[in-house]
Image: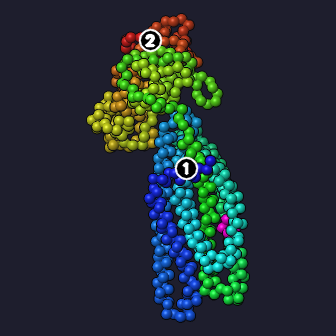
């Protein structure tokens, strides 16, 4: 399906501007043809008798003035429309990508997605603002010149356009080639963006392993492939102007031979013929531009196809039309025969028939060997993925029957890989709670034991922390993440190995902050710290995607040959001297 009609649909809101732009193009085309018309009286009347020279001069100046104003207005308006269309398309594409499920982001790299938003959209921008503008403006000018030429002498005009059909075939042939090559070029540019993003985000590992030369080699290979692909596009584009010049030269020679005969027979005046030839020469500019229009359209079609591929990708996590708002958690969360398999073609189940319940306010530790399904299990709660079997219920409501916004508003997350943004500390803490006051931000920071180190920074809460918070230590980043979750004040909390990469001193501060964070919240904790596991009201032990055991630390250790006891014996839990005493509550059902 041709993507251009769909692309031009984004220009519908700007129909008024488009009408004005077309009117300006009509003035441009009319003035261009009028300039050619004025050459006839110049030869036949003005030069023999200089009395009309002033009138003719004024007419030619006015014609060029109208042509210039029409060209400026049409170019400006078409560029404005193109920029608006591209802005709307980029905004929609960005939001559409953000709305995709976690599995979508596991299939696409950041470099690929950034390339769609930047490189592909920029390619479309050139087509909408420049290529389409040239096609309409120069096309109208071409119609004006052709109309004038047929008005002067239709037989002579037919001679002038005899080479037109010869132009069509190479335009179509090279257009298809340009379209396919441009798509490959965009793919290579996407790969180059991916390689660049990986090298820059992993710069520490690159330096630590002395792999600068390796990364440079990867980049050079990607850059070379992009160069070779772009060269193919350039070769296809570069052949069109010489071809047009050759055909144009042949047409002019034919005109001179045919026209000289008509002048000799006095069937045509010298002024008429000169005016006709001038119009033919003036047609060359629009024809040359139009020869590139098809190439530009083909490039835009290739980029549009890639953009619409993303826009036509629908999230696996869909909000049902009848979805209602989820009330704040009051009673419990139930996993009822939950199964899950990633949509990667393998069909292998990560979770099978997982069933357990958590009462409001309880802390549940999820433990198991690597690959047991711990992170997948907690990611199902905020619907980063949807269950492929069974259901998760909050106060008896299937989470697939409630709105995503109301569900995720009740879930706070702190992970091992802390995600912060290159903004101020205050903005990072208030992320997700835009209406928070400075007092509330500082209160959350104090509860997260972050206020003290924040006040030592030069700009305190207005200090920018760099990409992913690189200007802070690991413990400081974690405490900001905890402050962010505290300020959000969600009743459900997910902690995914939030302290696994910290030293003992930082962990003590973070653990104390986590105690404040988990107070009066329903918490799912994935942890390797024995202190954290001991604090849990219940421990869910996963083995190969199934619930092997559920109970408290002491009870599970007391089971001879139990899975938890084996894990404990394998020393998968790290023991620290500051382990907190367990908090006794009712067992998990």
Nearer to us in this view, 161 or 373: 161
Residue 481: image location, x then y, percent: 40, 32
**Residue where numbered disc 2 is placed:** 589
Count of numbered marks: 2
Q: Would residue 416 be visible to someone looking at this image?
A: no
Nearer to us in this view, 150 or 342: 150
Residue plotted at (49% across, 25% down): 380
Residue 461: image location, x then y, percent: 32, 40
Judge whether 516 appears above or below 467 on screen.
above
Residue plotted at (60% across, 22% down): 349
Q: Main secondary structure of the magenta part?
A: helix
Secondary structure under the numbered disc 1 in the rendered image: helix
Secondary structure under the numbered disc 2 in the rendered image: loop
**Residue where numbered disc 1 is placed:** 6
Nearer to us in this view, 404 or 583: 404
Q: Quadrant of residue 314?
A: top right
Q: Indicate left or right for 80 with 427 as reference.
A: right
Q: Quadrant of residue 297?
A: bottom right
Residue plotted at (69% across, 63% down): 168
Q: How busy is the neighbourhood of tag 1: few (under 14 within 10 Å), some, or many (20 plus)? A: few
Judge whether 95 appears above or below 285 on screen.
above
Q: Quadrant of the C terminus?
A: top left
Start and end of the magenta stretch?
A: 240-244
Judge whether 111 appears above or below 503 on screen.
below
Q: Would residue 169 be visible to someone looking at this image?
A: yes
Residue 45: image location, x then y, percent: 55, 90
């Amino acid at each position: 399906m041709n993507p251009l009609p769909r692309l031009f649909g984004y220009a519908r809101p700007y129909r008024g501007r488009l009408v004005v732009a077309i009117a300006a193009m009509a003035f441009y085309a009319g003035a261009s043809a009028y300039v050619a018309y004025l050459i006839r009286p110049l030869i036949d009347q003005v030069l023999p008798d200089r009395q009309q020279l002033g009138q003719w001069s004024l007419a030619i100046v006015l014609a060029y003035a109208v042509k210039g104003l029409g060209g400026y207005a049409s170019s400006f308006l078409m560029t404005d429309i193109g920029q608006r269309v591209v802005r709307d398309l980029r905004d929609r594409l960005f939001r559409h990508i953000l709305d995709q499920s976690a599995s979508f982001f596991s299939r696409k790299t950041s470099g690929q997605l950034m390339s769609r938003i930047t490189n592909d959209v920029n390619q479309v921008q050139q087509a909408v603002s420049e290529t389409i503008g040239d096609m309409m403006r120069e096309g109208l000018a071409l119609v004006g010149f052709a109309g004038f030429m047929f008005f002067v002498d239709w037989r002579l005009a037919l001679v002038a356009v005899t080479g037109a059909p010869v132009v069509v075939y190479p335009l179509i042939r090279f257009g298809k080639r340009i379209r396919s090559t441009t798509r490959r070029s965009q793919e290579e540019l996407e790969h180059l963006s991916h390689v660049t993003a990986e090298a820059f985000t992993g710069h520490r590992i690159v330096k630590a392993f002395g792999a600068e030369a390796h990364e440079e080699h990867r980049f050079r290979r990607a850059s070379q492939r992009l160069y070779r692909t772009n060269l193919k596009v350039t070769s296809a584009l570069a052949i069109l102007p010489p071809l047009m010049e050759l055909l144009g030269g042949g047409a002019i020679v034919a005109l001179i031979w045919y026209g000289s005969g008509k002048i000799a027979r006095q069937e045509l005046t010298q002024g008429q013929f000169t005016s006709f030839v001038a119009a033919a020469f003036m047609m060359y500019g629009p024809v040359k531009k139009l020869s590139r229009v098809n190439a530009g359209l083909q490039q835009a079609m290739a980029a549009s196809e890639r953009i619409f591929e993303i826009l036509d990708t629908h999230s696996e996590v869909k909000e049902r039309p009848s979805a209602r708002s989820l009330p704040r958690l009051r009673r419990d969360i139930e996993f009822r025969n939950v199964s899950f398999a990633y949509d990667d073609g393998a069909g292998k189940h990560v979770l099978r028939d997982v069933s357990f319940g958590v009462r409001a306010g309880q802390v549940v530790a999820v433990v198991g060997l690597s690959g047991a399904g711990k992170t997948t299990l907690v990611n199902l709660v905020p619907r980063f993925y949807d269950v492929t079997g069974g259901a998760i219920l909050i106060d008896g409501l299937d989470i697939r029957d409630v709105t995503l916004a109301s569900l995720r508003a009740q879930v706070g997350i702190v992970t091992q890989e802390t995600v912060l943004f290159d903004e101020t500390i205050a903005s990072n803490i208030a992320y997700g709670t835009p209406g928070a006051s400075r007092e509330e931000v500082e209160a959350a920071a104090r509860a997260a034991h972050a206020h003290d180190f924040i006040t030592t920074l030069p700009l305190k809460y207005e200090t920018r922390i760099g990409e992913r918070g690189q200007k802070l230590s690991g413990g400081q980043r974690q405490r900001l993440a905890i402050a962010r979750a505290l300020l959000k004040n969600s009743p459900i909390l997910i902690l995914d190995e939030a302290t696994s990469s910290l030293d003992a001193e930082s962990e003590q501060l973070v653990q104390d902050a986590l105690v404040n964070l988990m107070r009066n919240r329903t918490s799912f904790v994935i942890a390797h710290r024995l202190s954290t596991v001991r604090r849990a009201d219940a421990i869910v032990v996963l083995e190969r995607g199934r619930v092997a055991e559920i109970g408290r630390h002491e009870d599970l250790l007391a089971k001879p040959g139990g899975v938890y006891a084996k894990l404990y014996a394998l020393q998968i839990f790290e023991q620290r001297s500051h382990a907190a005493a367990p908090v006794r509550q009712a067992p998990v059902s």
